[in-house]
């Protein structure tokens, strides 16, 4: 699998990997990259079937998505990295921290969940996308991803609706199926990476109790709630999320 990625920032700086949510791509991080590259070498990539990364026929599992990251790290000669993920990206990060703890230094989990049922929600959505394409999801997704104020902004609707439309239909559907079968809860307590969980106060998809569940289970984890933010809190409130990420990844380093 060739994973489309971009590596920017000072060559000698610690590397932070940024992982996108279902239906977006690495441009989800546009508002974070300038702040993060002041301190880090930033590796942002597209999950399979999203952005510039191709899709294999599904269904996928989190092992597939985490495996793509491990292959990319090996290809780039990166032994150990920080990792930040939004939603599906955060699920990928938890899988990595559980299954490849030596590769993950600190972890930021934004608007995500360790188990996001019911499975039928995701298998039904996969069926809709295989039949009608991701364009059928644009309106409902924008309403999940942003508060009404932000979703009503033309630039946001164009940018994020465009990312969703551009996804490979099979890739999106197969990633949705990875959420249907996911259960990261049993091994969360084994995660040793220092972890920050960030929840959007108005997130209808992974509301703050999902972050609380993660923080209760991971021994080193702490949590922040971002006001006036729905599911893509980093895109809606970068001026709140960026300092949280910088503080988490630079503290004591
Ligand atoms: O788009 C959604 O419905 C919310 C979501 C769940 C997993 C993810 O990455 O986004």
Image (cartoon, rainbow, N blue to C red):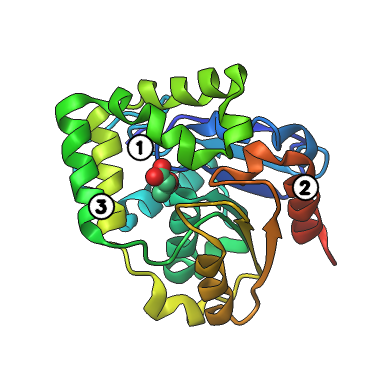
Mark 2 to mark 1 CA distance (whole Å):
29 Å
3 and 2 marks in contact (CB < 8 Å): no
Q: Is disc 2 placed on a helix, strand or loop?
A: helix
Residue 78 x %, y %: 57, 49
Q: Earlier in the sequence, mark 3 or mark 2?
A: 3
Q: Which residue is mark 3?
A: 121
Residue 138 x %, y %: 38, 27
Q: Which residue is mark 2?
A: 240
Q: Earlier in the sequence, mark 3 or mark 1?
A: 1
**Residue 92 versus residue 194 in the image, above or below:** above
Q: Which residue is mark 1?
A: 48
Question: Which picture quadrant has residue 116?
Answer: bottom left
Question: Which picture quadrant has residue 251?
Answer: bottom right
Horizontal side of residue 183 vs 31, given as left or right: left
Q: Is residue 41 something that shows in the picture?
A: yes
Q: Is disc 3 placed on a helix, strand or loop?
A: helix
Q: In the depicted view, which residue is nearer to us: 122 or 248?
A: 122
Q: Quadrant of the C terminus?
A: bottom right
């Amino acid at each position: 699998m060739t994973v489309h990625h971009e590596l920017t920032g000072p060559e000698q700086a610690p590397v932070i990997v940024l992982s996108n949510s279902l239906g977006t791509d690495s441009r989800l991080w546009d508002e974070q990259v300038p702040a993060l590259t002041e301190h880090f070498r930033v590796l942002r990539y597209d999950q399979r079937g999203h952005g510039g990364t191709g899709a294999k026929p599904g269904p996928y599992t989190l092992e597939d998505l985490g495996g793509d990251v491990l292959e990319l790290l090996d290809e780039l000669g990166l032994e150990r990295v920080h990792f930040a993920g939004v939603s599906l990206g955060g699920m990928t990060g938890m899988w990595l921290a559980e299954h490849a703890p030596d590769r993950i230094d600190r972890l930021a989990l934004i608007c995500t969940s360790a188990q996001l049922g019911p499975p039928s929600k995701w298998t039904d959505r996969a069926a809709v996308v295989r039949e009608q394409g991701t364009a059928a999801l644009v309106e409902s997704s924008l309403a999940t991803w942003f508060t009404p104020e932000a979703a009503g902004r033309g630039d946001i609707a164009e940018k994020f609706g465009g990312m969703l439309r551009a996804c490979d239909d099979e890739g999106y559907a197969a990633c949705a199926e990875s959420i249907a079968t996911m259960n990261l809860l049993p091994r969360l307590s084994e995660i040793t990476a220092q972890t920050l969980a960030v929840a959007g106060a108005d997130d209808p998809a992974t509301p703050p109790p999902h972050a609380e569940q993660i923080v209760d289970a991971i021994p080193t984890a702490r949590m922040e709630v971002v006001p006036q933010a729905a599911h893509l809190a980093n895109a809606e409130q970068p001026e709140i999320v960026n300092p949280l990420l910088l503080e988490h990844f630079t503290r004591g380093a």
